Image: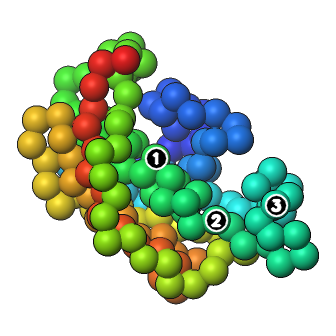
Amino acid sequence: MVLDVIEIQKILPHRFPFLLDDRVTQINEGESLIGYKNVSISEPVFEGHFPGHPIYPGVMILEGMAQAGGILAFKSMKDVTEEEIKNKVVYFMSIDKAKFRNPVRPGDRLEYRVKVLKHKGNVWVLEGKAYVDDVLASEAELKAMIVDK
């Protein structure tokens, strides 16, 4: 299953400049997701992080990973309509074991690989990893809850 940014916007409430997933290339419902973000020098965050030496902030990598996890959780919910999804939101409860391995720069394609570690009711525990050219840039364990808006 491939989701473009239009389909992603039907799932996530985020919009520019805070929608941090451009495309989902693979979903195994209840198991895993692969998606990506194209990192561009035109993004507002590069005005201050860092002038003359642009590095994509780690917190933005984690947020993109979290958004990919939200997409996986919503697409894994059985018998939920698009209308019902509009009335729900993902709240992240914790981000643990976050590590930043390599810098991400403008021009990079940041690939998110998210796996379900545990799912019970409306709570999801996910393993998230972010890669650039198959080199690990960041990783974390994400815990989230899907709730009504």
Image coordinates of residue 145 in percent, x first then y, are: 25, 37
* CA distance separating discs 3 and 2: 10 Å
Question: For the residue marked with disc 3, what is the amino acid?
Answer: Gly
User: Which element type, helix, strand or loop, lies under badge 3?
Assistant: loop
Residue that appears at 52% across and 37% down: 8
Q: Is residue 59 left or right of residue 141?
A: right
User: Which element type, helix, strand or loop, lies under badge 1?
Assistant: helix
Q: Is residue 94 left or right of residue 23?
A: left
What residue sits right under mark 2 in the picture?
57
Q: Residues within 10 Å of mark 3 (few under 14, many from 20)?
A: few
Residue that appears at 72% across and 73% down: 55
Q: Which corner quadrant of the image does residue 133 belong to?
A: bottom right
Labelled disc at residue 48: 3
The mark lying in front, picked from 1 and 2, is 2
Sooner in the amino-acid sequence: mark 1 or mark 2: 2
Vertically, is 94 above or below 55? above
What residue sits right under mark 1 in the picture?
67
Sooner in the amino-acid sequence: mark 3 or mark 2: 3
* CA distance separating discs 3 and 1: 23 Å
Question: For the residue marked with disc 2, what is the amino acid?
Answer: Pro
Residue that appears at 27% across and 58% down: 126
Vertically, is 56 above or below 67? below
Residue that appears at 36% across and 35% down: 90
Vertically, is 76 above or below 11? below
State the residue in front, 95 or 22: 95
